[in-house]
Image (cartoon, helix red, strand yellow):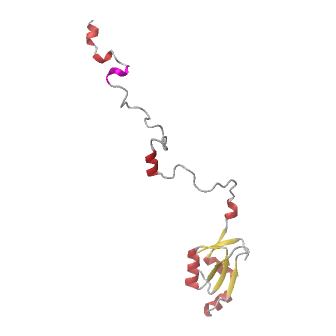
Amino acid sequence: SSTLLGLKKNRYSRGKVSAGYGRVGKHRKNPGGKGKSGGQHHHKMRFQNYSKKYFGKTGMRIFHINKNKNFSLLYKLGDLSHLMTSKIMLISKEINFYSRTVNLISGRRDKLLSNLSCSFYNSIIFLRKASKRSINEAHINNNVIIKLCSNNN
């Protein structure tokens, strides 16, 4: 009987939920689920606030995507001067008229970017694609007109 008196009251109900503490509020390993679970259910607000476009589809489905047909080589604005002779460049600088037209549609390169300064004057260039910056720079600084055309023209 001495051993029974020495035990605490809770020893009798150890292992049972009715030990006075119940099931609620226990420390459990993953109470909300592991990782990104519940993103569409009980953790929905967190995903809506911090990563809005995590779920769902965007854009068109392209089954056999082929990026080669959209690829195009570049011209830089400064590199176009090698297409013109130095005589024509000098004449066009002195006389204020469009002395030279350059057709770059038939070539393999078809996009114009303005990485370098333009070193020729008073010309008309036909291209498929060009950036807005290159068009503005060429026209303002050197009086070069860039016309955008499709393959057929």
Quadrant in which the C terminus appears: bottom right
Q: Position of residue 8 (x, y in %)?
A: 28, 16
Q: Position of residue 56 (x, y in %)?
A: 55, 50
Viewer-closest of 16 and 70 = 16
Quadrant in which the N terminus appears: top left
Viewer-closest of 15 and 142 = 15
Q: Position of residue 74 (x, y in %)?
A: 65, 70
Range of magenta residues: 16-20
Residue at the far top in the pictured view: 1
Q: Position of residue 105 (x, y in %)?
A: 71, 75
Please report the residue visible at 38 percent of the width from the left and 32 percent of the height from the top.
27
* Magenta stretch secondary structure, dominant: helix
Look at the image and say whether residue 19 sits in the magenta stretch: yes
- Residue 146 is left or right of residue 37, and the answer is right
Viewer-closest of 118 and 103 = 103
- Residue 34 is left or right of residue 9, and the answer is right
Look at the image and say whether residue 9 sits in the magenta stretch: no
